[in-house]
Image: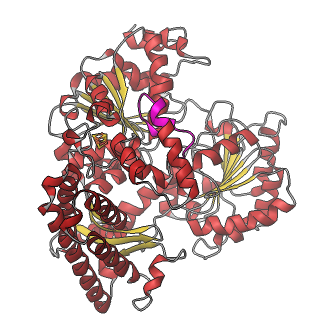
Amino acid sequence: MSPLKELFAETGPISRSGPGYRFRPGQLALAEAISETLNQKQTLLAEAGTGVGKTFAYLVPLMLTSGKSIVSTATRHLQDQLYERDLPRIKSALGVSIQTAVLKGRGNYLCLYRMERAKEQGRFLRPEDTHAFSEIVSFSGLTSTGDIAECSAVPEHSPVWAMATSTRENCLGQQCPKLSECFVMAARQRAAEADLLIVNHHLLCADMALRDEGFGEILPSVDHVVIDEAHTLPEIATEFFSQSISTQTLSGLARDSLAIGLEHARDAASWPDLCGGLERSIMEMRALLVDGTDREASSRANFPQGRMGWDQLSASDEQRWIVALKALGDSLSALREVLSLNADRHAEIAQLAAFSLELNQRLAAFQETTPAALDVRWIEFSRYGMSLRRTPFEIAARFQQEMGRQPRSWIMLSATLAIAGRFDHFQRRLGLHDASTLIAESPFDFQRQGLLLVPQVLPDPKSADHISQLLHQAAIKKLLESVRGGVFILCTSHRAVGLAARWAEMWAASHPHRLILVQGQAPRPVLIEQFRSHGAALLIGSHSFWEGVDVPGDALSLVVIDKLPFAPPDDPVLRARSKWCEAQGADAFAAIQVPEAAILLKQGVGRLIRSESDRGVVVIGDRRLAETGYGRRMLRSLPNFSRTRDPEDALQWLASNVQGGRAATAHRGSPELES
Ligand code: SF4
């Protein structure tokens, strides 16, 4: 028996890592393929269906291999879960004592220097901010890691954290008087010493893109990189290979310059005029997004939200933007000049001078018009701020360059990496043409555990109120009435969430036992926890609820998906990528839109069955899934649920499988839905 076979055997050491362990052939096959890849320093792409146990399948070989390893996860929450729950269990089951550490982006650690500065200057406008700040000060005396996730009294999204955390640009580094107590430096030190380090994709990509997010010194010494939830990597890498400059960053520069200038170089210039000039340029630019004549509009609460390609501007609007950007560049240069002249008066002034120079360069890069450039210029805006961005059409060459810096093994895994059994799309996006691939099938009996319903009668997926029409259908109403467990309504847009919330308000009046939860009412983790513990709640959410949500048992028995999750066709990045793709002779819809929607749909459907005893129904309110060629291709990527187009079948199936009726044989659906 191979060592891995012994470890993963029904009564082997891994079985002692926690209750409910079962031998799963897919898990062993995945662990063996990973072990081989680690030995050969090659690249493996693996799709592991729900329930395979992919985390242990990579942690065990990593613990047994020689050399330094990095595991990158999609979110900070998953980092904590891996570090606090999975790693200790595997370490004790294997009896190994390797050194492990977790490292997050610097914004996740308290910055003692900035906190002290804010305490000295500190006048907060809102009483709740004053209170939150005093909680942060108390936390600073108690924490040993400075990880802001541990400060439960202040939510992570509180704006006050900006005053007590650092950025790459404002950190004083070696010049900092708090360097010896610095939490960021301590976390990096622990990371440098670890044999196995847990990071997240943002940190990994930031480091690849900037080589300055904290483990630029660590990456070169790493022998193995495992990327979990790898389906999210192309988007995150694209974001980090983009260039951007935001109004929040510019305002932060103005705010910090005003404070430090008045304190350490009061005689050097009229700081309020200089910094106010920059703020005014920002306001002028924002005003262009509402109405050129309405200057007040740029600060209104109902400021529009969206994305706009530079190529979508009319000739006259483009001219106005050019003038506004020129004014912004001039204000920024004026401030940079004064900061540079006074750089020797304080380390923070020197830091801000360097940062303002970088911002000037980023602004100039945005304004550059290079017809042959393989990127798109676009503007993202909301009432909170605005970003000017340049995003590359494709990142494969750049990603390959980063991967090729040193021979090491790369393992990329996810429950949703392949489309209809093939990895082509993912391979194309990251240039991984020579990688080995593996699909480890889920041990769940999806045919018996789930039913997929695409009703025969459905509203037009292109109609503006599609979700309202869907939820008012008698068949859907009946399903909602008969299911006893919890319900997810997953929408493809925020607008649809709003319409579904309006429907739910009325529906709740006649269903008082249901707890209605709507995205935006509370932070996502709070909503998910409420949903889990209630057991019969109805949650309405858009994209952030399609993945990373794990609700086993009857607390989730029905998932309603409004439509196929195609990206909005007017998205400036998608438009530019599609145009570029077509210029290469490919069909952009088939090459970009369909595969990306297929992966997201697979994620959404995957919320339903999370354990071997789960049962439930998924409704997809989009007939294109059953009636078009690309829809059937997407269908082939989904778990092999029983399938039907008749809502009556779903009612019967629920009654016999989920609501405690007799064990029924899985219903075989109508032919159009069979893959
Ligand atoms: S070194 Fe940077 S992050 Fe650390 S305390 Fe100083 S300013 Fe803050």
Front-most of 67 and 521?
A: 521
Front-most of 491 and 416?
A: 491
- The image shows residue 530, relative to residue 344, as above or below, that is above
Q: Quadrant of ligand 1?
A: top left
Q: Quadrant of residue 68?
A: top left
- The image shows residue 635, relative to residue 556, as above or below, that is below
360 left or right of 79? left
Residue 78, percent from left and from top: 47, 36
Residue at x 34%, y 63% (from the top left corner): 255
Residue 108 magenta: no
Residue 619, percent from left and from top: 67, 55
**Residue span colored magenta:** 139-155
Front-most of 454 and 394?
A: 394
Q: Quadrant of residue 197?
A: top left
Residue at x 52%, y 44% (from the top left corner): 134
Residue 239, percent from left and from top: 32, 56
- The image shows residue 50, relative to residue 542, as above or below, that is above
